[in-house]
Image (cartoon, rainbow, N blue to C red):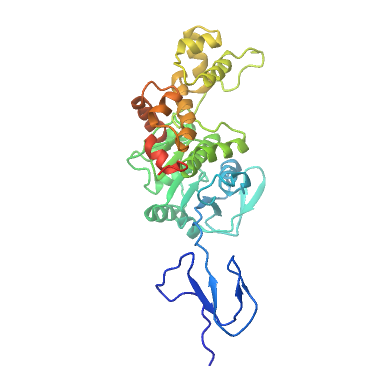
């Protein structure tokens, strides 16, 4: 009887860059570990370092869904991104579109169908699970199989994310009980009534509770997905993804969902608010006040406050703080500069003030962020 063919080290043996195994076919070994030639003696075969595991993202698809939110998730996590070569410390995401019955055509709003190749077992096994909606939020029925898969994924330690009405699925699984959460503003009161243990906040773009995150509808899903990329890979990578999306790289999750006048009238040729915002971005390191911004807009303080809030869904100074935090991220990722120096460079009057606002916006400290995303920082 022929001897069994050797395929690797003995059970329990450590595998490192220089670990070798033997094969009965002899030959030379090249620098990259390839075997050449033939013969009868044992051959050392180099085994390379085991690659970093890919962070698997699973997104839920269902019959009757609107395609926008699903498309956002696919665009952010499923698109090949050669432009990120050299920026990533870990591999880009893997993406699986999952459904209750894989292989069954799912109708989409707009008159087309799609087919998901993966089932809920794959969704339950993913590292990040995204529910971009439920079939009928007002109907009150959430797939029991989806609820069970969400609970399984959460118990495993997966990150669970909802967009728009997807919050109803997370609430049905009990993952939002005792926590603040958001959904599309038109569903907020219904979510509050149906799940009184959830602290529903209808006035924000997204809420990050660490392992469970919720966002408002449609475009807020873009903000939350970019927030996840920023958490996983840092500001430079998130900014690159946003640039390819052609959207702003960072909107504070606490920004209002509903903006009274997001599109300015055509006849308003001189947009003073926009001019003041650009001026502020050019002077972030300087002391900024509402009066100074109003002067740049050529408005009175009172008129400026009203127009700015109606246009942007937040106050001028809260917007300034969010822009200063965004400007600080690439500085924290660089190896140079102390937290105190970075605070001053982006316009905070002290490191303590910087830490306070950074913690509110990013849900972590500047030092912890630098430890996670800093390049060349121990």
Residue 342 at x, y = what percent? Answer: 43, 28
Quarter-wise, where is residue 359 in the image?
top left
Residue 73 at x, y = what percent? Answer: 55, 45
**Residue drawn at 58 percent across, 40 percent down:** 241
Res 152 seen here: yes
Q: Please name whichever residue, 235 or 258, is drawn nearer the observer in this view of the structure.
A: 235
Q: Is residue 316 above or below residue 299?
A: below
Q: Please name whichever residue, 70 or 270, is drawn nearer the observer in this view of the structure.
A: 270
Q: Is residue 350 above or below residue 62?
A: above
**Residue drawn at 64 percent across, 81 percent down:** 38
Res 252 seen here: no
Residue 102 at x, y = what percent? Answer: 57, 59
Q: Is residue 175 left or right of residue 259?
A: left
Residue 16 at x, y = what percent? Answer: 46, 65
**Residue drawn at 46 percent across, 53 percent down:** 127
Q: Is residue 309 above or below residue 246?
A: above
Q: Is residue 292 above or below residue 175?
A: above
């Amino acid at each position: 009887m022929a001897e069994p063919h050797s395929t690797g080290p003995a059970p329990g043996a450590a595998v490192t860059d220089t670990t070798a195994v033997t094969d009965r076919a002899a030959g030379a070994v090249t620098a990259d570990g390839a075997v050449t030639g033939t013969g009868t003696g044992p051959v050392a075969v180099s085994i390379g370092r085991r690659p970093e595991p890919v962070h698997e993202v699973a997104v839920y698809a269902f019959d009757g869904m609107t395609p926008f939110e699903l498309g956002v998730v696919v665009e952010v996590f499923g698109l090949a991104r050669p432009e990120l070569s050299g920026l990533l410390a870990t591999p880009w995401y893997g993406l699986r579109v999952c459904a209750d019955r894989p292989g069954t055509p799912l109708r989409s709003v707009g008159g087309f169908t799609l087919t998901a190749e993966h089932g809920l077992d794959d969704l339950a096994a993913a590292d990040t699970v995204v529910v971009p909606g439920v079939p009928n939020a007002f109907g009150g029925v959430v797939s029991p199989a989806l609820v069970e898969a969400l609970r399984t994924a959460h118990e495993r330690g997966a990150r669970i994310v909802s967009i728009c009405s997807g919050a109803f699925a997370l609430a049905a699984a009990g993952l939002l009980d005792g926590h603040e959460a958001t959904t599309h503003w038109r569903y907020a009161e219904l979510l509050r009534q149906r799940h009184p243990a959830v602290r529903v906040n209808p006035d924000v773009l997204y809420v990050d509770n660490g392992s469970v995150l919720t966002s408002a509808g449609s475009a807020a899903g873009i903000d939350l997905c970019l927030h996840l990329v920023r958490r996983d890979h840092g500001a430079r990578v998130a900014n690159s993804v946003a640039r390819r999306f052609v959207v702003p790289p960072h909107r504070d999750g606490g920004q209002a969902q509903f903006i009274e006048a997001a599109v300015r009238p055509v006849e308003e040729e001189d947009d003073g608010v926009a001019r003041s915002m650009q001026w502020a971005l050019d002077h972030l390191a300087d002391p900024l006040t509402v009066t100074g911004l109003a002067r740049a807009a050529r408005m009175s303080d009172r008129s400026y406050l009203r127009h700015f809030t109606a246009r942007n869904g937040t106050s001028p100074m809260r917007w300034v703080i969010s822009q200063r935090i965004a400007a600080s991220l690439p500085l924290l990722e660089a190896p140079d500069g102390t937290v105190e120096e970075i605070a001053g460079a982006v316009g905070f009057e002290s490191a303590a003030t910087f830490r306070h606002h950074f913690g509110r916006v990013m849900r972590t400290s500047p030092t912890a962020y630098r430890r996670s995303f800093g390049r060349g920082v121990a």
